[in-house]
Image (cartoon, rainbow, N blue to C red):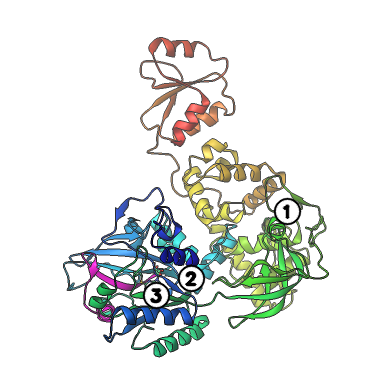
Amino acid sequence: MQQLRQLERDHPGIPIPPDSPTRRVGGAPREGFVKVPHSAPMLSLDNALNEAELMDFDRRVRELLGDESYQYTAELKLDGLSMAVHYEAGNLALALTRGDGAVGEDVTANALTLRTLPLRVADPPFPKFEVRGEVIMTHAAFERLNNDRREQGLSLYANPRNSAAGSLRVLDPSITASRQLEYHAYYLLVDGRPALDSHWDSLELLTRMGFKVNPKRARIAGIEPLLDYCRQRGAERESLPYEIDGVVAKVDSIPQQERLGWTAKAPRWAIAYKFSARQADTVLENIDVQVGRTGVLTPVARLKPVVVSGVTVTNATLHNEDYIRELDLMIGDTVVIERSGDVIPKVLRVARQGAERRPFSMPAECPVCGAPVLRAEGEAASRCVNSSCPARLKETILHFSARPVMDIDGMGDALVDQLVERGLVKSVADLYQLTAEQLSGLERMGGKSAAKIVANIATTRERPFARVIAGLGIPFVGERTAQLLAEGLGSMDELMSAPEGRLQLVEEVGPKVSESIRRFFAESHNQELVARLRGVGLRFESDGPARAQAGPLLGLTFVLTGALPTLTREQAKEMIEAAGGKVTGSVSKKTSVVVAGEEAGSKLDKARDLGIPVWDENELVSRINS
Ligand code: IVH
């Protein structure tokens, strides 16, 4: 990008094509959000990738300003996503993501949930103003989120920046609210122009107005002190609670900024000094395989210890077999690893092939239980086929006991290891049969704590039905989906028997989730598990009523006739009722729709006579889904 931009600068005679990537600023707004034009374009900044480039920038500024003196305001470059927030009469009125720079996406409902963003500014200095700043997620919030997602069997976010973006740009504001995002302001505008004559003064005013403004800011004259500021911030980088990727230096005076002006993409009065990426070379000494709760085998790189920006790295995830093949990675190679805000470092590529390199292959047998390992067609993951593999069982028990699921206090790693290794627990249902005597025989377990744990387990019989669903560990069914399923279906019996079409009537349940649920309950050992959990007295029903008072079929009266290809008569009836419709036995003028299958008889004829619409099963399901 830097080179292309330089070429374009060096050849002013050649017109820059309208689709040159140098003109592109960000991603296009995604569907589902209302698009709103920005008061002034949200452009990005040019980068200085080293000290020499920062000095070049300073030289250009000096030359363009003639002999005038000038100052910089230097700030941290926060690694999140930018958001513009408009206030009217002191009230937060509109929040926009950057979008494509010219047009943003309206995320007001989500922005309202950010606690660091004032909803109201008392005694506003301007009747209308706009604040621009960065939405970020702290390392702590990021790790909490990913831990929760891991427990729920959901995919993990790669870094705090992606998860901040994923948390802000969701259609459901309650998700944003749960994610603990922060907003740091760095720009104050009125009618699309800087509000005051000094950027520094704007930041001070923003602080007084109640915005969070990064405290590491400094007003600096001269390139040497600016370089010092950059070096200090670089040294502090690892100890900050959030991710930064550099320093932003802005010419402080707005009149001077105006004289310096803008290129098509970025201001000439500001620069982003980027810290070097946190990469290092090291030797891949071995590849181990770990088995997770769903039986997925994950290859893990064992690395020759190497210090990357102050942290010693010894392991990195390799995701799956394909990832290793795509990188053409072999044991003994020297690899480039990167820490990018995530706790788990990544292997980016092979730097040098090892002299005696040795290929990795996924073991044919599970390293924990020895059962066969299978890789389903079209899937990247290899799985241990043994559903009672001790590795899976341990992870399953930990998941079942986790805080957002059944919340069994005291059920930690060490205890679960012993329970599984001594054969005391072979399924989560066995937890409810444990006695204090059995537990007090375990290492580091006194009689008192044993009794306590038995009591803790007993109290989980009162946990709501939604948590029981989450505890089953159905792939793709996390805490939230479990809640929606509990509300939508009302009981375990319904959940176990509902056809996929019915499951998909539940909010957020698509084909992937419905198929996973059906497949889970089709397995006999899962049916046994459910039967045992019923036997120990867990709650198998929701509190609230499950019947729909609304839905796409509300007010319509249906008659079913003939044999439908996949649904039984009873299931079709339930689906219609769940979608707000009513089912009666005979066709009359009051009938809205006749749903006909094979060998439909006189009812179908009568419907045709009366001019009543006739649907097949497909039509019924797609109407309900729409
Ligand atoms: S000033 C024209 N200040 O970096 C002024 N940006 O590449 C542009 N960023 O899109 C923004 N911290 O998302 C500014 N203290 C800071 C910043 C900052 C992070 C981001 C912002 C912008 C990108 C520029």
Numbered circle sitting on residue 141: 2
In x, y percent, where is residue 500? 56, 38
Q: Quadrant of ligand 1?
A: bottom left
Side (left or right) of 582 relative to 423: left
Kindly indicate the quadrant of the structure image that contains residue 294.
Answer: bottom right
Work out whether residue 117 or residue 269 is closer to the camera in this orientation and state it.
269
Sequence-first disc among 1 and 2 = 2
Q: How many circles with numbers are drawn on the protein? A: 3
Real-space CA distance between mark 2 and mark 3, rounded to the nearest whole angstrom = 29 Å
Q: Nearer the viewer, residue 471 or 79?
A: 79
Q: Amino acid at mark 1?
A: Arg
- Does mark 3's beta carbon lie closer than 8 Å to ligand 1? no
Q: Which label sits on residue 383?
A: 1
User: Residue drawn at (59%, 28%), measured in percent from left and top?
Assistant: 566
Q: Is residue 609 above or below residue 330?
A: above
Give the magenta part as a residue range. 182-205
Callout 2 amino acid: Ala
| Residue under label 3 | 271
Q: Residue at x 40, y 32 (%)?
A: 553
Q: Position of residue 335 (x, y in %)?
A: 69, 70
Residue 110 position, x and y percent, is: 36, 59
Return the residue nearer the eye: 373 or 223.
Answer: 223
Q: Is residue 75 in sight in this rendering? A: no
SS label for mark 1: strand
Q: CA distance from mark 1 to mark 2?
A: 31 Å
Query: Can residue 168 be spotted in the picture?
Result: yes
